[in-house]
Amino acid sequence: YTSDEVNQLISLTKGTKLEIAVIFACFYGLRRSECVGLRWSAFDFENNIFHINHTVVLTSVNGKRKLVTKDAAKTDATIRSMPLSADIQKRLLEIKYIQENNKKRLKKNYNNQWSDYLMVTENGDLISPDYVTDAFRRLIKKNKMRHIRFHDLRHTCASLLLQSRADIKSVQDILGHSNASTTLNFYVRSNMESMQRATAKAFDFA
């Protein structure tokens, strides 16, 4: 997506179960498993930083779908720390306040199993990674936005970073790639193709 489309998407998802996933996919390039795996204990609001060190995935066990949580290994490149912008921090604190109120209001009816997680429903249930994918597809279709997959928001983040002249090493670190070749091979090529199309259009070649 372009920056304008990202802004539209952020506006459409505010206050919904998709909001956190969209924010962190667009601005930090998180995978859906990383979005669902975000925990309040990984956020340091005093120092404006958070850590990506945990994932939640869906797997099949005896024919049934089951949520599996996992801490990233210490040597894993997917472990990374990110700065929090003032606007995102403000919104997260608002969401945290709402969640705390839900706990007090629902008491025993609140599911405290996932109380440290950001992406929970009103009654504390963890939002499924599959829900993120399906709800995102329905949202953009309903609002007649250009069709992309939720995972493409990760590509959007990388492309916008490159367009803002971020260096390859920074983009590699933000996306959690183990080496720069992945970033170079996919994102730089993709970005070059878009620039080539724009150049061709400017000269009436396309």
Image: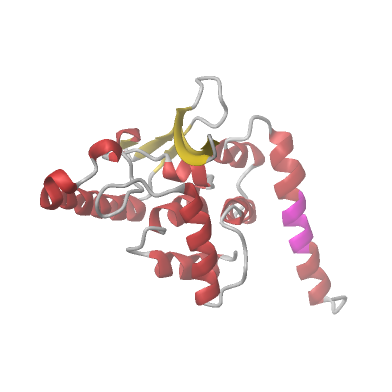
Q: What is the x, y in percent for residue 60?
A: 54, 38
Q: Nearer the viewer, residue 69 or 18?
A: 69
> Where does the N terminus fall, quadrant-wise?
bottom right
Q: What is the x, y in percent for residue 68?
A: 46, 34
Colour theme = secondary structure
| Residue 53 makes an appearance in the image | no
Q: Which residues are magenta?
A: 189-195
Q: Nearer the viewer, residue 180 or 137?
A: 137
Residue lying at 64% horizontally and 54% vertically, measured from the top left: 159
In the displayed structure image, the side of residue 42 where residue 34 appears, left or right: right
Residue lying at 35% horizontally and 38% vertically, measured from the top left: 39
Q: What is the x, y in percent for residue 6?
A: 51, 64
> Where does the C terminus fall, quadrant-wise?
bottom right
Q: Name which quarter of the figure residue 195 lies in.
A: bottom right
Q: Name which quarter of the figure residue 163 lies in.
A: bottom right
Q: Name which quarter of the figure residue 179 lies in.
A: top right
